[in-house]
């Protein structure tokens, strides 16, 4: 088995283009590890690579899920497992790329065995979250799962809601399930991970420019199409970066300028959280701070050569 290459980094950091170039140089194929790029309805909003950008490289798990589905980390992990094994049998090098750190964490460290939560429980918790906010969720969670409530504080309503709904559905704190993990798909020695950490100021500028480009490429039309379907606003696809603001504009609630500025701001904040995730969850992954594509390639190929001596490639 050839070690898989995992490429992670904040949004707009150039992960996709780098993964495609690595695949070309090492006769590999690309597997998506981004929770929004799985949705077929979010071609533009999720910055999913086009056929032209793929440049003949086979891509997997991109745009294959309908926006009406609640696609989970567990769903992705099973599909990724099957795809990795298939590519291994074909002698292809596996390149996983994406900004969803939880996907890559589950792939390399295992996934918690949390039972499915009934939809009626989810609906009840959503109602609580809308009425009481993150602080209300934390106050409800604290008596039954103090560890999670203290760790999350009031800064992460989504995870607070998830922890509370797990308790309501099972009668146990989510921490009990998190201590019992499935074995990882990729064991130590079967992968090498790289974290892109470009200068933040330049990245934030790129995020703003990219969103403006998305508007020109049809992001608003994607948002309108989803709204016309009458989908639950709590679905993951409806929470894609920029989507809530585009939806509000499409409904006539805010101006286009207000929608664009807030969408850019939220995406910059998300990138900041991704930097934090890298520091906390992937402390030993090699960092590549340079935004230069050639420099990134040199680092990846040189380190990959160290763990996979038989590979012959041009490292110039």
Image (spheres, rainbow, N blue to C red):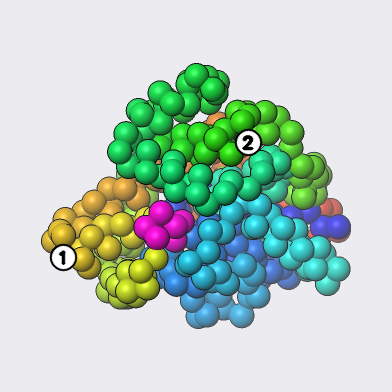
The numbered disc on residue 170 is 2
Of residues 258 and 254, which is closer to you in this image? 254
Of residues 268 and 240, which is closer to you in this image? 240
Residue 34: image location, x then y, percent: 54, 57
Asked if one can make out residue 313 in the rendered structure from this viewpoint, the answer is no
Q: Is residue 191 found left or right of 299 in the rendered image? A: right
Q: Quadrant of residue 247?
A: bottom left
Against 282, residue 42 (above or below) is below
Q: Is residue 245 found left or right of 168 in the rendered image? A: left
Q: Is residue 130 found left or right of 148 in the rendered image? A: left
Q: Quadrant of the N terminus?
A: bottom right
Which badge, 1 or 2, is on the more N-terminal residue? 2
| SS at badge 2 | helix
The numbered disc on residue 293 is none
Asked if one can make out residue 140 in the rendered structure from this viewpoint, the answer is yes
Which residue is the extreme one toward the front? 120
The numbered disc on residue 252 is 1
**Magenta range:** 232-238
Mark toward the viewer: 1 or 2 = 2
* Residue 4 inside the magenta-drawn segment: no
| SS at badge 1 | loop
Residue 4: image location, x then y, percent: 74, 55
Of residues 144 and 88, which is closer to you in this image? 144
Residue at x 27% of width, y 48% of height: 265
Against 62, residue 138 (above or below) is above
CA distance for labels 1 and 2: 41 Å
Residue at x 44% of width, y 48% of height: 123
* Residue 234 inside the magenta-drawn segment: yes
Residue at x 31% of width, y 48% of height: 266
Residue 69: image location, x then y, percent: 53, 64
Against 53, residue 32 (above or below) is above
């Amino acid at each position: 088995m050839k070690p898989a290459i995992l490429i992670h980094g904040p949004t707009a950091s150039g992960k996709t283009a780098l993964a495609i170039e690595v695949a070309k140089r090492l006769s590999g194929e690309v597997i998506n590890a981004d929770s929004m790029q799985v949705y077929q309805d979010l071609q533009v909003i999720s910055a999913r690579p086009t056929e032209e950008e793929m440049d003949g490289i086979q891509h997997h798990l991109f745009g294959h899920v309908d926006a009406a589905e609640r696609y989970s980390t567990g769903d992705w992990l099973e599909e990724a497992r099957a795809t990795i094994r298939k590519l291994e049998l074909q002698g292809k090098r596996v390149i996983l790329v994406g900004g969803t750190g939880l996907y890559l964490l589950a792939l390399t460290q295992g996934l918690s065995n949390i039972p499915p939560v009934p939809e009626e429980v989810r609906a009840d918790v959503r109602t609580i979250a809308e009425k009481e906010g993150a602080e209300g969720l934390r106050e409800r969670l604290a008596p039954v799962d103090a560890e999670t409530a203290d760790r999350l504080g009031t800064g992460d309503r989504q995870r607070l809601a998830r922890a509370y709904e797990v308790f309501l559905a099972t009668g146990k704190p989510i921490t009990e399930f998190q201590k019992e993990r499935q074995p990882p798909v990729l064991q130590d020695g079967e992968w090498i991970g790289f974290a892109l950490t470009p200068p933040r100021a330049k990245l934030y500028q790129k995020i703003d420019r990219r969103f403006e480009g998305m508007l020109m490429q049809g992001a608003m039309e994607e948002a309108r199409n989803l709204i016309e379907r009458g989908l639950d606003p709590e679905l993951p696809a409806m929470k894609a970066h920029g989507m809530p603001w585009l939806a509000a504009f499409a409904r006539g609630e805010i101006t286009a300028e207000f929608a664009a500025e807030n969408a850019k701001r939220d995406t910059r904040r998300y990138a900041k959280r991704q930097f934090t995730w890298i520091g906390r969850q992937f402390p030993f992954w090699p960092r590549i701070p340079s935004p230069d594509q050639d420099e990134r390639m040199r680092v990846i190929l040189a380190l990959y050569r160290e763990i996979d001596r038989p590979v012959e490639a041009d490292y110039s």
